[in-house]
Image (spheres, helix red, strand yellow):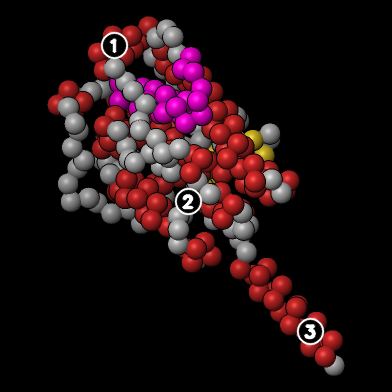
Amino acid sequence: MKNIYLLLMTTLIVSCATQNKLSLKDVKSVKVTSKEERSVLYFKDYAPKKASRKIASIKKLDEQMSDANSYFFSLYSQYRTINKLTNTKDELNICPQFHNEIIISKIKASAVNASDNINYRKFQSTPYSVITHPSLALNYKSEKVFEYLSKKALWGNAKKVVKSALSEHNKLNLSELKSLCESGFSEGLYAYKNMVSYYSSNTFAFSKKSMPAFLKIPVLANMLILHNFTDGMNHYEDNVITSLNITWFKSYLDDLKSEVDDKKKYLSLR
């Protein structure tokens, strides 16, 4: 009788654990642009709210900056920031289309918090961490970082794997930068301009459907990926989200930061 009781209790515990444990298929996701190499990003339901005031640009010149310049400067600063995180050398040497702008603006990497300070082990038991730490959803050896670390039981190597995944991700940013430098065009810039022209001025920007649409833009995706490693957006990124009329996106990133150490949030996605 005692053995039967223990068996029933064990079954109940396992059953409860199974019901509470999320899988990646339970989490909403979006593919960044249409390129196969780009990663999938995960996000939570979010009801955008109109801000009481717009984010002010640091320089008056930035208020008059073209969409192309805002996008390029944001992407270039993000590229340099990830290189700083991963101790990788910048490889964008020639840029005819934005040569003068680069010299005048002196684009720098954002200040970063060392990825070595992040304790990834505490995220291994919950797939919700791909939302709070999007770098865990980046591609790594044909898998997502989270899946690779879980399948191989290699969470002790998480920092090294995340840095490698960030480096690979940044190669795609570099590829887009080279396209912009050579032709002034990229798929990401095209998507950004379309969103500014057709969606930023109507109610779509404040609907729940807007999040996956905006995250398909590489610059927005990079903001999400970098929010764990930086203290906030730079003024080029501020210009981008202001042009898109989605200043609520900054609040979304702030909300994610506040959830990182709240383990109760990890099981509240259903």
Within 10 Å of the Cα at label 3, are there few (<14), some (14-19), or many (20+) other Cα atoms? Answer: few
Q: Nearer the viewer, residue 96 or 135?
A: 135
Is 8 above or below relative to 94? below
In magenta stretch: residue 85 = yes
**Magenta region, mostly helix, strand or loop?**
helix
Mark 3 or mark 2, whichever is nearer to me: 3
Q: Amino acid at mark 2?
A: Thr
Q: Magenta residues, as a range? A: 68-91
Report which residue position mark 1 lands on: 103
How many marks are shown on the rendered structure? 3
The image quadrant of residue 7 is bottom right
Cβ–Cβ under 8 Å for marks 1 and 2: no
Report which residue position mark 2 lands on: 132
Quarter of the picture containing the N terminus is bottom right
Task: Provide residue 237's location: percent of width, then percent of height.
Answer: 31, 33
The image quadrant of residue 76 is top left
Q: Amino acid at mark 3?
A: Leu
Element at label 3: helix
